[in-house]
């Protein structure tokens, strides 16, 4: 009959083997966050200027017709995405991006475009 120490040693080896095997079974087979960050940081100047007249940048490995994926967030998941319950900066940053409107108020409480390209023109009578 095997001794108690022998059974504990076998169980420990089995447990360590499973712990080494489990990460290989992960459903996340794509590039990790480090690879995405490296791809985002390797940029070349864009061919056309951005809205403020400066040269933008796009990743070097993308064609002009490709979409660019922007990763926003942090290491931790946000505690909530409910604007009424958010009290931390992680949630607040994501909520700000999720709930962006066509217009917003700037520091002087003037209406400025947010997602809209420009503000609409008002008619002379101010109705439309």
Image: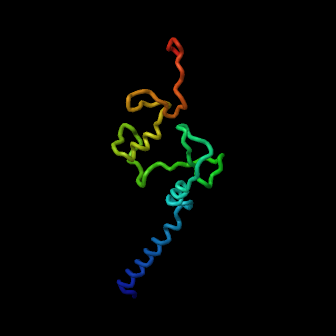
- From the top left corner, tell me how far across and down residue 26 is, in percent: 52, 63
Left or right: 49, with 9 as reference point: right
Residue most toward the top? 125
The image shows residue 2, relative to residue 51, as above or below, that is below
Left or right: 114, with 48 as reference point: left
Residue most toward the left? 87
Residue depicted at 46% across the width and 41% down the height: 97
Residue depicted at 54% across the width and 54% down the height: 40
Residue most toward the front? 54
In this rendering, the count of numbered labels is 0
Residue depicted at 46% across the width and 29% down the height: 112
The image shows residue 64, relative to residue 6, as above or below, that is above
- From the top left corner, tell me how far across and down residue 39 is, in percent: 55, 57
- From the top left corner, tell me how far across and down residue 74 is, in percent: 43, 52
| 49 vs 90, nearest the viewer | 49
| 119 vs 85, nearest the viewer | 119
The image shows residue 39, relative to residue 81, as above or below, that is below
Residue depicted at 47% across the width and 48% down the height: 72
The colour scheme applied to this rendered structure is rainbow
Q: Quadrant of the N terminus?
A: bottom left
- From the top left corner, tell me how far across and down residue 81 is, in percent: 42, 42
| Quadrant position of residue 13 | bottom left
């Amino acid at each position: 009959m095997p001794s108690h120490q022998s059974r504990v040693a076998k169980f420990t080896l089995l447990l360590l083997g499973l712990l080494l095997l489990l990460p290989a079974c992960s459903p996340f087979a794509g590039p990790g966050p480090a690879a995405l960050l490296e791809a985002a940081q390797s940029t070349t100047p864009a061919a056309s200027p951005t809205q403020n007249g400066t040269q933008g940048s796009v990743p070097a490995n993308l064609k002009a017709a490709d979409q660019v994926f922007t990763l926003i967030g942090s290491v931790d998941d946000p505690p909530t995405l409910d604007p009424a319950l958010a009290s931390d900066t992680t949630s607040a940053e994501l909520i700000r991006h999720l709930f962006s409107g066509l217009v917003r108020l700037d520091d002087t409480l003037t209406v400025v475009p947010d997602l809209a390209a420009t503000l609409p023109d008002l008619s002379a009578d101010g109705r439309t």
